[in-house]
Amino acid sequence: MNWNLNWTAIITALIGVISGWYASSKNDHTSREEVYAEHVPDLWERLDKQSKQLDKVIAERDELRDKVQDLQEKIEEQNKTIQQLTFSVNQLKTSYEEDKHAK
């Protein structure tokens, strides 16, 4: 009889431990969900703020890209002008040298 009483106590204790663990884990899960739910609006707000900042950075990047392209076009035009001026100066030098030797 003592043997059965011990097994009954062990089984009862084991059921109690398992029930306590299950209730605790379920409660803990619910508690975590409540914490997440409390922070969701803050997380959405932060995500929205980050998205707006990213949009601004993208707009600035596009604007700078356009400015760089405009400046590259101006540089090409100035290089052409410099080449034309260099050619004209060389022609003047040649003409001056020819006139100088002709006299």
Image (cartoon, rainbow, N blue to C red):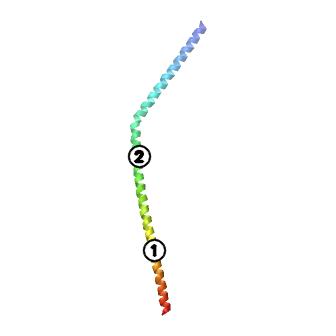
Locate the N terminus and report the quarter of the image it occupies.
Answer: top right
Q: Would you place residue 103 above or below residue 93 in this image?
A: below
Residue projecting furthest to the top: 1
- SS for tag 1? helix
Q: Earlier in the sequence, mark 1 or mark 2?
A: 2
What percent of the width, then of the height, locates residue 55?
Answer: 40, 49
What percent of the width, then of the height, locates residue 12?
Answer: 54, 14
Which residue is found at the position 44% from the left and 28% from the top?
30
Quadrant in which residue 41 is drawn? top left
Identify the disc placed on residue 82: 1
Tag in front: 1 or 2: 1
Which residue is found at the position 47% from the left and 27% from the top?
28
- What's the residue type where badge 2 is placed? Ser
- Label 1 to label 2, Cα distance in Å? 46 Å
Which residue is found at the position 41% from the left and 59% from the top?
66
- What's the residue type where badge 1 is placed? Ile
Near-viewer residue (49 or 16)? 49
Q: Would you place residue 48 above or below residue 17 in this image?
A: below
Identify the disc placed on residue 10: none
Q: Would you place residue 48 above or below residue 35 in this image?
A: below
Residue projecting furthest to the right: 3
What percent of the width, then of the height, locates residue 48?
Answer: 39, 43
Label 2, residues with CA under 10 Å away: few <14, some 14-19, many ≥20: few
Label 1, residues with CA under 10 Å away: few <14, some 14-19, many ≥20: few
Which residue is found at the position 45% from the left and 77% from the top?
85
Near-viewer residue (60 or 15)? 60
Which residue is identified by label 2? 51
Contact (Cβ within 8 Å) of mark 1 with mark 2: no
